[in-house]
Image (spheres, rainbow, N blue to C red):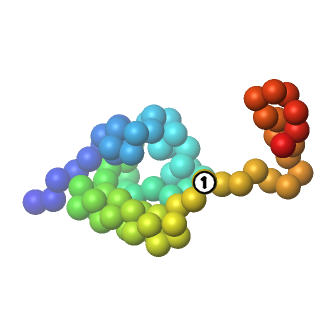
Amino acid sequence: MHKLLSLEQVANLLHISPSTARLRIARGSSMPPSFRTGRRRLFLEQAVSDWLLEQARNSSATGSQPKKSSPGRKRRDNLGGLV
């Protein structure tokens, strides 16, 4: 039998709040595959593990560099000057 995880358990594994997990699902953002049973959203533990491994592979393949600020956005240094 497969082990099932609740939305709260998966959110805890991902270090996000349950409300953020619900929002990601509603928006179609990246989340492990899940299904509904009644009013509960459940995740297969193996599917969550597979999804996390895939995310790690994709992250290391792209180099996971920090995002640069958009060209139209002005940043200030610690002294108040524009960068």
Could you say where residue 21 lies in the image, as x and y percent from the top left? 47, 44
Farthest left residue?
1
Q: Nearer the viewer, residue 40 or 6?
A: 6
Residue plotted at (35% across, 38% down): 12
Residue plotted at (52% across, 70% down): 62
Q: Nearer the viewer, residue 46 or 40?
A: 46
Residue 53 visible at all: yes
Q: Is residue 24 left or right of residue 39?
A: right
In which quadrant of the rendered image does the N terminus lie? bottom left
Q: Is residue 36 left or right of residue 49?
A: right
Q: Nearer the viewer, residue 63 or 51?
A: 63
The answer to which quarter of the image holds residue 57 is bottom left
Could you say where residue 45 lies in the image, as x and y percent from the top left? 24, 55
Residue that badge 1 annotates: 66
Q: Nearer the viewer, residue 4 or 15?
A: 15
Could you say where residue 78 lies in the image, as x and y percent from the top left? 76, 29
Residue plotted at (52% across, 39% down): 20
Which three-letter amino acid code belongs to the residue tagged 1? Pro
